[in-house]
Every structure is written in structure tokens, then in C-alpha cells.
Amino acid sequence: MKSNGIFFAGLCLAFFLVACSPGIDRDKFRNAEHAARGVQGAVSEGVSYQRLEELVQRLSGEVAVLQGRARSEKEKELAKEYSALLAIYRDGLTLWKYHREFSGHDFVPKGLIYVGQDVEPIVTKYRLQTESHIFGPTQQSWKSISEDSIQVIWYNAGQQLKRIGALLKGEG
């Protein structure tokens, strides 16, 4: 019976320590939040590729700063969520880049994105449906995805932003 009391006291102490652990210093995340909202707004507005690339680069800088400033477990978790958001935006930029670069080639039909080696991991990560093709002159096989796949990436970014918002809201 005595060991149950010690166990209970230890459990209470653990809960107390977790409850009193430092939370999130929102000021540390203000610039990252602003940069992330800027990227999401730009996606919604349909800005140019170059402008979106600049905004993602800005977010990248803010995320790098967070990695060194996050102290509590909650801050580290939030910094990790921002890193995941940045990765999603970079995936979207990669698809958009391939769409732009290969849309001028006759072998890639309109509305499709060529699946090159940079796109393969994105296809796998988001489980994007591919279509196989044969390039006539060389009989070389290649794959494509729908240009709508970019919207799948932007949707995932929006969902990641919601997760970040929920983490911040839980701190309020």
C-alpha cells in the first residue's frame, strides 16, 4: 500500500511539472507567423512564381531563426510544425517550377506536370496519382501528374497552418 502512495505522489509531481512547464513565447513566433500568413495569402491571390519564391525564402529565414530560439518543448514542437509548413511550400514551388519549365515542351501535354527526379519524392509524399507515357521518338517512358496536384500541396499547407494555429490557440 505504501508503494501505491509513493507512486501516486510521483505521478502528481509529474503532472505538476508538466502543467508548470514553460509554454510558448508568442513573440518568438510572431515573424514566422507573419511570414507564413504572407505566403498563404500569396497562394490565395495567385501571385507570380518569383514573388511566391521570395516569400517562401523569407519564411525559410524565419524558420531558421526559430530553430535556434525555441527553448521549451512546446516551442520546439511549434518550430517543428513551421519547418513542416516550409517543406510543404517548397514542395509546391517545385511542382510549379516543373510545370513552368516543361509546359513549353511538346512532349508534356497541357494540364500535366512532368515527374522528374525532384518531383518523385513529392508524388510519393502526397500520394499523387501518376500517368505513364511513352516519348515516341526514343520510346523512353516517363510519368506525369495533373497540374491540379499543385492545389493538393496548397491545401496541405492550409491544413498545416491550421495545426499551427491550434497549437498557438491552445496557449491562449
Image (cartoon, rainbow, N blue to C red):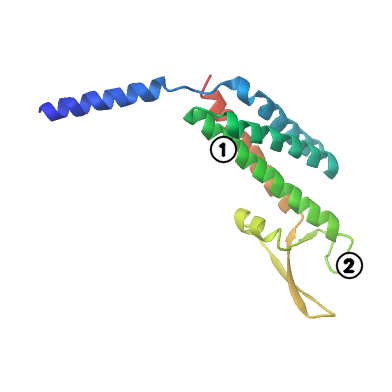
Location of the N terminus by quadrant is top left
Q: Which of marks 2 and 1 is in front?
A: 1
In the image, residue 94 lies at what x, y percent? 74, 52
Q: How far apart are marks 2 and 1 (CA)?
A: 41 Å
Q: In this view, does 14 lie to the left or right of 40?
A: left
Mark carried by residue 112: none
Q: Which residue has dot 1 on it?
A: 80
Question: In the rendering, at what x and y percent does residue 145 appear?
Answer: 72, 60
Residue 133: which quarter of the image? bottom right
Crowding near the residue tagged with mark 1, few <14, some 14–19, many ≥20 C-alpha atoms within 10 Å: some
Q: Which amino acid does label 1 sit on?
A: Lys
Left or right, residue 61 beside residue 28: right
Find numbered disc 2 in the image and state the secondary structure of the residue it sits on.
loop
At mark 1, the secondary structure is: helix
- Type of the residue with mark 2: Asp
Q: In the picture shown, does residue 96 fall above or below 30? A: below
- N-term mark: 2 or 1: 1
Mark 2 surroundings within 10 Å by alpha-carbon count, few (fewer than 14), some (14 through 19), many (20 or more):
few
> Residue 157: percent from the left, percent from the top?
66, 41
Residue 132: % across, % down: 71, 70
Residue at figure coordinates x 85%, y 69% from the top left:
107
